[in-house]
Image (cartoon, rainbow, N blue to C red):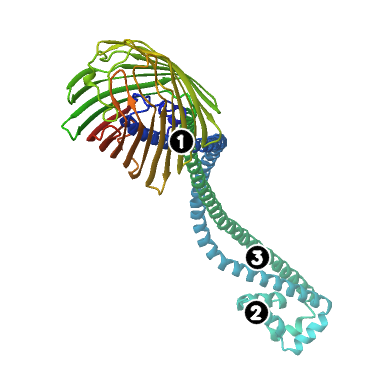
Amino acid sequence: MRSSIFYAIIPLGLFLPAGSASAAGNPGAVSAVDESEDTIDSIQNEAQSVTDRKNNEAALQSTQKDLQQTELDITSTQSSLADNSVNITQGQADLTAIQKNLQTAVQQEDTAYDNFLKAYAKALSAVDEATALQTELIRYQAEYEAAVSYENHINSISSVSSNNTTAIAGRAEEGNGSVPSEIEAKLKEYNYDENYLDTINKQLYGGQSQADSGSTVQDESEENDAVQEQAAADAASRTAQAESELENAQGRMDELQDIIAASDDAKTDWDDAQKDVAELTKDESEQNEYLAALLQDQHELTGYLTEYIENRKNLADDIFSIKELLNPYQNYSSLQTSAKFYTWHDGTGHKGKQYINRTDYSAAIGKFEFGLSGGTFRSNNESSNNGSAGGLLDTDLHMGIRNFSEINQVTYNMDINIPTGKNNLRSTTAMSTDLVPYDRFGDGWQITPSIRVKHKVNDINYILYGGGINFKGSYNYNNTSINPGTEFTGNIGWLHAAEGEQFLSQMFFNKSARSQDGDLSYRDGSSIEWRNTYNKQLTKNYNWPSYVWLAYSAKPDYYDDTTASGSQTRIFYGTGIEKKLSAKEKLRLMFHGMHSIGSDYDPVTQLAFSGRDRYSLKLSYNKILNDKNSYSVSLEDFYMKDSGNSTQSYKGINLMFSYNRNF
């Protein structure tokens, strides 16, 4: 962002005519050359300030929007931080619960593992015992089934024997005393040994052989019944015993299977406990990752919030700075010092030189502005009547009150000339202001109240007007008392300050009251100036500056009619090219011309001529060192020729250097 100081400060050069004038009140050629280029700089700066103001206004709107968005970002981030803090608190509580559950699960896993080891040790013994018991179960099952079958057959035989004794005896006889074949086969099926079979036969047949049994069956019927009953009882007892042994073995097998199943259950419990630990460990890891993400978010959000708060401060500072730039009441202070050397010679051997060193300080605080300027000089006129002088120049004091609005910028001024310079000099020191800037180096006290107004038509067009009264005090010159008359001034103009093209057209008016030079009474003729200054940006790096200034002064009135003088018309013109070498450097080459018509006589310095033409080339270089420091150098080569009663010609070279410091 660039400063809009040129918008706030109305350049004095846009309002006041030349300080050094010819005898008839028209500006001298030297000051016209300097002022023309100063005016070109002023309108360029005005255009730049208009552009800067537009940019600053756009920047202000953009920055204010950025600030509003930043405020929203801060609110949103603070809300996100609060929500994230709640999530972190909840996440930490969840992690604590998970870790507590995990600790319990680990303890349960250790217990389940110990239980499994104990159950597994019991199961190993149970498996070995069950393996051995399995064989016993098969045997017990077979014995039980054999006992049951045997009992059933004994019961069947007993029933048949008691109901069919005769038939049995008969069949015994028919079978030659043998046991029925189906009974024997059945008994052998259950592995009853022969001794046991013999026992049964003896019980059935009373110890007789099979050959004799057939003859005694009938006689021993009652005895057989007793034997059968005993056999049935033995079979039932045997069956009960086999059943008891089988049930005991099966009960033990069930116990062993329960022991083995308990091992499997313990293994399942251990596996489940391991799964619980694994799941809770996974939950803990995921919760830690979740918390880490939340903490990272908290860190990032805190960073964003810090950044947003810093951005808010920077944006607020930028808004303040931009508003300061847009504020027409800008505070400033600057110092300019310059050194200028002028030299000339004519064709008759006459020559002269003048060295001017000036220092100008200006400042503004709020509505008040202040300026102070002064300097030293050294002048040497080597003509037919040589004259030289050196010392201080008059000191100028400026005070102003600014009253600015969006449309009108009004400044009320009070300028005071303090007579610190040398004024009581011989007239032989005076040189024409077409050759050097000063024809005399001191005046009396002067107090000039004035007003200047800058009226805004639109962003790039302005109307300028103002006026003042210069109350001039008396002083001595060439041992003569000079009492200059009061001077009334006014001006009006139009300024067009577009970015690529600038134009300034102004009219200056001057009317003087009666003056007294010793015994000579006179009144300077009224004067009018019409100044037109133009600058065109040809390309990004090239400008075309030019100007045409017309000045007319009426014939002075001498009350004793002893001195004759006429009116005078002067035309100042110039054109050139300006090259932008870089963002901080520019080079300008200007051609300046002057055409003067009519007579010119100054009763104070007693300088007179009828007309002349002046031409010069001026090369200037400007360099901005930084935001506060800049300097410029220039070199001018000129040629001037008198017309009318004189055909004298002049040549000269002028060298100038200035340094600017902004505080």
Q: Which of 194 and 6 is in front in this view?
A: 6
Circle nearer the N terminus (1, 2): 2
Q: Which of 624 and 215 is in front in this view?
A: 624
- Where does residue 365 sit, x and y in percent of width and height? 43, 19
Tell me the number on the disc at residue 189.
2
- Where does residue 203 sit, x and y in percent of width and height? 70, 74
What SS does tag 2 mark? helix
Residue 186 drawn above or below residue 302: below
What SS does tag 3 mark? helix
Most distant residue in the left direction: 349
Q: Do the residues labelled 1 and 2 touch (CB within 8 Å)?
A: no
Residue at label 3? 242
Q: Which amino acid does label 2 sit on?
A: Glu
Q: Left or right: where does residue 399 sit relative to residue 180? A: left
The N terminus sits in image quarter: top left
Q: Distance between the residues labelled 3 and 1?
A: 140 Å
- Where does residue 651 sit, x and y in percent of width and height? 22, 36
Q: Distance between the residues labelled 3 and 2?
A: 17 Å
Circle nearer the N terminus (3, 2): 2
